[in-house]
Structures are given as structure tokens and as C-alpha cells.
Amino acid sequence: MNQPGETTHFGFRDVALSEKQTLVNDVFHSVARRYDLMNDLMSGGLHRLWKEWMVTALNPPRSEHPFALLDVAGGTGDIAFRAAESSGPGFKATVCDINSDMLGVGRERALARQLEGQVSFVESNAEELAFPNSTFDAYTIAFGIRNVPRIERALGEAFRVLRPGGRFLCLEFSTVDVPGFDRMYELFSFKVIPPLGRAVTGDGQAYEYLVESIRKFPKPAAFAEMIRSAGFSRVTWQSFSGGIVALHSGWRL
Ligand code: SAM
């Protein structure tokens, strides 16, 4: 149980645990329409490669064999669309997000790609998923978990909704520790991203939150330990692009 008055981080600010979700929701309501464009601009298109990397690790079946994916904090649907496009007719994805504006953009994109039969959208909180126990073959969360106030609860929910034998995959910004590159990355993060966010979305503070929240997220070994504590087995991780992102994997056995 969280105690009244318990605090957490919203970027570099200490805020009440109960306040963080409201602040995070404001960020994504504000940037939803320009979210995909900003991802391309900020990462120079690299986010596409990182997401492709996650879907390759997921390796959904290309057959008619049924396979149910839950993509949590799925926002505008990138992971679910990529997975649907590289899988067979038995594949179904549920994109779950707490933010109706992000889901609204996702629904429009699903229609444009004619994926509405394979990808559905549900508004739900990662900390209290609106799905029964043992429902999904895989759970993915990309650039989402650091926004969730109670990460342990979200991991517990991931374990609950996965079937035994199910796969957990988390793609998240991580820690750059390549000498020289770390200084450049720091400068780019704090001096370029917020002004770029202000110019493109009108909300520079949203992108200040983004870079600050990345610095506050646990290091990969510590996050792996949190995943193990939630009950997952065979937990591993790999870093990509000099540590800008890491992909964590675990199994509900
Ligand atoms: N996964 C998408 C991608 O990779 O493009 C979107 C990632 S976006 C950076 C983070 C998403 O997390 C937002 O859509 C936000 O609404 C969602 N989010 C934040 N807190 C959440 C929560 N408690 N439960 C579910 N989704 C949440």
C-alpha cells in the first residue's frame, strides 16, 4: 500500500504519487497530434529501428496459429501495427493506453492501414489492467513504463494478464555510457529536444519532462531486478545505440 504523502519523480521534480499520472496525462494530451512527427525528428528516425528490433524479438507467428498481444502504453499504435504487419492471420493485438487522445490518433492510423480487424484499442491504466488473468501470449510496452507512477504495480499486472509461457518485452530509454558520446547525448537532450518540442508541438515543457524522466529511470540491471521481483523468469536485456535504449525480456513460466 502507498502511504498518503508518498512522493515520486515527475522528471526532476518530486511530486505526490497521486499527482504524477495527472501530469503525465497532460503531457500526452498536449502532444498527441504531433507525437509521431516529434519521434521522427528527435530520434532522426531511429525509433523506427528500435521498434523493429522489439518486434523481431517478439517474433509473432506467421501462421494461422492464434497469438494475442497486449501492447501497453501503446499510444498511437506503432508496436501493434509493426507486429501485425509481420505476422500471420491468427495475430490479434490490443493497444491499451490511459490517454484517449493518443488512442484516438492510433484508431485513425489503424483505419488508414486497414488493420482495424487485427488491432483494437482499449483505454486502461497499466497499473490496473482491464483484462482477466492469463489472457495474452505476449505483453509489450515501448517507451511507456517510465511514465507509470507505480512501476512495480504495472509489472505485477503484466505478469497477471500473461498466460503461462507468455513473453514480456519492454523497450525503454536507458543509460548512455560511451565516453564522449554521453556528453554529446546530454547536450542534445537538454539543449535541442525541449526547444524542438516547443517549435513542433507548442509544448517545450512536455519534452523537458521527457529528457528528465529518462535520467530518473532505473539503470538496466536494476530494472531487470524489478522484472524478476514481479515473478518473471529468464530475464535478460540488451542495449542499443550506445545505451540510448534497452530492451528487457522476461517469461512467465
Ligand atoms: N508505445 C508508444 C510508442 O512507442 O510510440 C507510445 C509511447 S508514449 C512515449 C507513452 C505512452 O504511455 C503515452 O501514450 C501515455 O498516455 C501512456 N501512459 C502513461 N501512463 C500510463 C498508464 N498508467 N497506463 C497506460 N498508459 C500510460
Image (cartoon, rainbow, N blue to C red):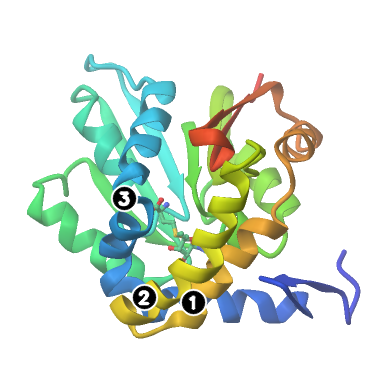
Question: Pointer 1 and pointer 2: residues touching (CB < 8 Å)?
Answer: yes
Disc with the residue nearer the chain's start (3 vs 1): 3
Q: Give how far across and how far down residue 19 sits, in percent.
A: 69, 82
In the rendered structure, find residue 206 and report the number of the disc placed on it: 1
Q: Give how far across and how far down residue 30 sits, in percent.
A: 39, 81
Disc with the residue nearer the chain's start (1 vs 2): 2
Query: Is 103 left, or right, of 64 in this rendering?
Result: right
Q: Give how far across and how far down residue 165 sits, in percent.
A: 57, 19
Label 3 belongs to which residue?
44
Spatial CA distance of label 1 from label 2 is: 8 Å
Under 8 Å from ligand 1: the CB of mark 2? no
Q: Amino acid at mark 3?
A: Gly
Spatial CA distance of label 2 from label 3 is: 18 Å
Query: Is 208 left, or right, of 65 in this rendering?
Result: right
Mark 1, other Cα within 10 Å: few <14 / some 14–19 / many ≥20: many
Query: Callout 1: helix, strand or loop?
Result: helix
Q: Residue at x 48, y 35 (%)?
A: 241
Disc with the residue nearer the chain's start (2 vs 3): 2
Q: Residue at x 91, y 73 (%)?
A: 3
Label 2 belongs to which residue?
31
